[in-house]
Amino acid sequence: MMSEKAPTENPAADLVKTALEEYQGALIGYAASILGDVERARDVVQDTFLRLWQQEPEKVADGLKSWLFTVCRNRAFDILRKEKRMTHLESQELEAVAGGADDPAEAAEREESHRNVLQFLDRLPENQREVIRLKFQGDLSYKEISAITSLSVGNVGFLLHTGLRRLREMLVRQAV
């Protein structure tokens, strides 16, 4: 007679499943903004989740979001260093990541605005671009951005404030 096997708990599998559901899209968008390529971003995010699978769940569960963005960021920059070049994300690729279907006129207007913001974002210093990406694409707190970038929380706030002010100024100048 075969004994019925009770389902086993697998905290690592549960953690990865939860993380995939909650953070996969944001991580792909973040990695794509660094790499300029959605397919390479998907590879980076896949690698990030493979690394999560290898971790002890209790060691990363409390700071999961920061841990994921840190690993994703480091992996993306590893790829850039290896390739010795950086490309920019086209607005159509970003729209493919963001998804969504709505009124064509609204979508065209949003795409034009998005293209303008990305164009001006590229004119900012790298450290300002990165904290803005983490804040708005990753929806991370100053503390989480600080942990990912190794900058102080105050420096993160300063870079965000300065970068957003400069973006606003560029957009206002363009509108005039």
Image: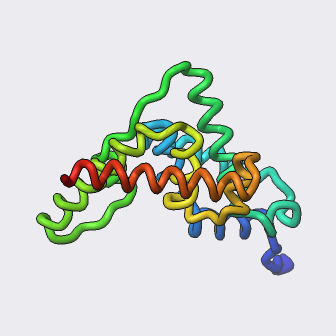
| Picture layout, residue 158 above or below residue 15 | above
Q: How many marks?
A: 0
Residue drawn at x 41%, y 39% as measured from the top left: 122
Residue drawn at x 27%, y 49% as measured from the top left: 173
Position of residue 176 measured from the top left corner of the image (x, y, whole percent) = 19, 53
Colouring chosen for the image of the structure:
rainbow
Q: Is residue 145 visible?
A: yes
Q: Is residue 11 left or right of residue 101?
A: right
Q: Is residue 24 visible?
A: no
Image quadrant where one finds the N terminus = bottom right
Residue at the left extreme of this rendering: 105
Residue drawn at x 76%, y 46% as measured from the top left: 150
Residue drawn at x 37%, y 59% as measured from the top left: 98
| Picture layout, residue 160 above or below residue 89 | below
Q: Nearer the viewer, residue 127 or 44?
A: 127
Position of residue 31 measured from the top left corner of the image (x, y, whole percent) = 53, 45
